[in-house]
Amino acid sequence: MARGGQGLARVAVVVRAGAAPLWWLGVFATGIGVLVPGLTGRRIGVLAGSALFIVAAAVVATVRRGRYTALARSAAHAGKHDVLQDRAVTLRNWRRGHRWWLLLAFLAALGSAFAVPAAAGLLMAGCGAGLWLKSAWIGRREQAEDALLWVRVDWLADGAGRPAGKAVRAYRGTGIAAGDAAPGGARRKTAAPV
């Protein structure tokens, strides 16, 4: 980074980074949990898990939206010396920073299946779905404003996963074509050759 430039990570990519691991670990834990009869029985476990899935998805998708909106509203334009972090690097940093939490959550979901089958796995999957919904909401905002939102890498927590945390004081903005991720943090589709 030269002349005062900052490393910037896409806000939507950071939000989306945990969606796939939480979803797939939750689905896997649910599948294993259904095989265990548990103390409450499979039917009650799956019904409780379904309710937890819906609640978790709704809460994760909506929590801190006001903070995201306020930071987006005051976003300054990124400077020419700012370095835009690749999508793959952002995903890798988030997953490395959270790998032990993901493993512990997965093991807890498996262990809880002996009490309430499948419930904790569906809770994990619901958190993953909520993160996808939140990143889609950020993507719609980015498209509406025709600007991508970025956060300074050094303001993210050690686990690289708090794009609206206390340490984050402002976002930076770029044009919609900047970086290698589409609005919402998904992989950018390359244009077909003409």
Image: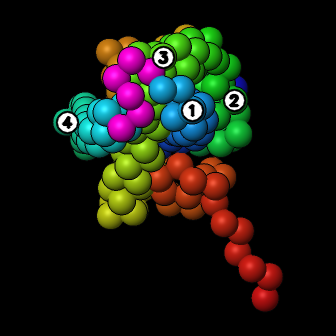
Badge 2 marks a residue whose secondary structure is helix
First in sequence: mark 2 vs mark 3? 2
Q: Residue furthest left?
A: 66
Marks 2 and 3: which is nearer the front?
3
| Left or right of 59 on screen, residue 33 | right
- Magenta-drawn stretch contains 41: yes
First in sequence: mark 3 vs mark 1? 1
Amino acid carrying mark 2 in the image: Arg
Which numbered marker is on residue 66? 4
Q: CA distance from mark 3 to mark 1?
A: 10 Å
First in sequence: mark 3 vs mark 4? 4
Q: Nearer the viewer, residue 165 or 53?
A: 53
Q: At x 48% / y 26%, what residue is drawn?
A: 37
Amino acid carrying mark 3 in the image: Phe
Q: CA distance from mark 4 to mark 2?
A: 27 Å
- Magenta-drawn stretch contains 71: no
Instruction: Give how far across and how far down residue 190 sits, in percent.
Output: 71, 68
User: Answer yes or no: do the residues labelled 3 and 4 have beta carbons within 8 Å?
Assistant: no
Q: What colour scheme was applied to this rendering of the protein? A: rainbow
First in sequence: mark 1 vs mark 2? 1
- Which residue corresponds to mark 3? 114
Q: At x 66% / y 66%, what residue is drawn?
A: 189
User: Answer yes or no: do the residues labelled 1 and 4 have beta carbons within 8 Å?
Assistant: no
Badge 4 marks a residue whose secondary structure is helix
- Which residue corresponds to mark 2? 92
In the depicted structure, whether residue 148 falls above or below residue 56: below
Report if residue 81 is visible in the image: no
At label 3, counting other C-alpha atoms closer than 10 Å, the crowd grade (few under 14, some 14-19, many 20 or more) is some
Write down the region rendered in magenta: 38-43
Which numbered marker is on residue 35? 1
